[in-house]
Image: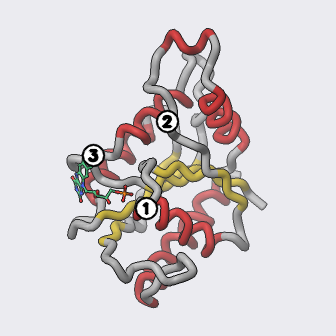
Amino acid sequence: MPQIVMLVGSLRKESINRKLGHALRQRMADRFDFVVPDLDLPLYNEDLWADPPAGVTALKQAVEAADGIIVVTPEYNRMTTPIIVNAIDWANRPYGKNSFAGKPAATIGASPGAQGTAVAQNLLRNLMMIPGMHVMGNPEVYLTVKDDFFDAEGGFANERTVAFVDKWIAAFESWVGRFS
Ligand SMILES: Cc1cc2nc3c(=O)[nH]c(=O)nc-3n(C[C@H](O)[C@H](O)[C@H](O)COP(=O)(O)O)c2cc1C
């Protein structure tokens, strides 16, 4: 099965975006294998390449082996989070050893707010193009997450959400297929 690296832009245990990533992986388990790297990495520091942090090496190896990238992003101040920016910075370096070039990719995200990460994802897609990811532009999925959004098994509680997300999943599968 094709392998997908899922970057989750929140470190907290009860993160709605971590839960979203989990629900998405459940729905895609029959078509992709997933790697979810630990993004609790030191802030980017050129000096650390002398003895790179294990998490950075693992991230780069996972991205290089991947057939596609999914970024699940929260919205912080109408932006993606520093966790995602930092992960992209690390795997884009050292100079000449960018791990992302040519990888098909997509964004998705959740927020308690009405705009559901729309602004953050819009900026994030531009950022992801810099290291040469081929970013799926549509369909766009911006999710407003309230208490009853996930069911007891960690899936999507609402059938309309399932139908909406499934269209995004089908588009992503086809997008990845175009670059394989
Ligand atoms: C520094 C900071 C900035 C935030 N800015 C926004 C924002 O611009 N838009 C928004 O919808 N929510 C914003 N929020 C609220 C987050 O959407 C909310 O905390 C969300 O649960 C974070 O994602 P997570 O649950 O995956 O950690 C912000 C939260 C923090 C901590």
**Amino acid type for the residue under numbered disc 2:** Ala
Residue 133: x and y, percent?
52, 41
Residue bearing the label numbered 2: 87
Q: Is ligand 1 within 8 Å of the beta carbon of the residue shown at mark 3? A: yes
Secondary structure beneath dot 1 equals loop
Q: Which mark is residue 51?
A: none
For disc 2, the neighbor class at 10 Å (few under 14, some 14 to 19, many from 20) is many
Residue 100: x and y, percent?
58, 36
Q: Is ligand 1 within 8 Å of the beta carbon of the residue shown at mark 1? A: yes
Q: Is ligand 1 within 8 Å of the beta carbon of the residue shown at mark 2? A: no
Taking the spot 40% from the left edge, 36% from the top edge, the residue there is 85
Taking the spot 74% from the left edge, 57% from the top edge, the residue there is 2
Using the image, determine if residue 17 lies above or below residue 78.
below
Residue 177: x and y, percent?
67, 59
Number of the front mark, 2 or 1: 1
Q: Earlier in the sequence, mark 2 or mark 1?
A: 1
| Residue 58 placement, left or right of 152 | right
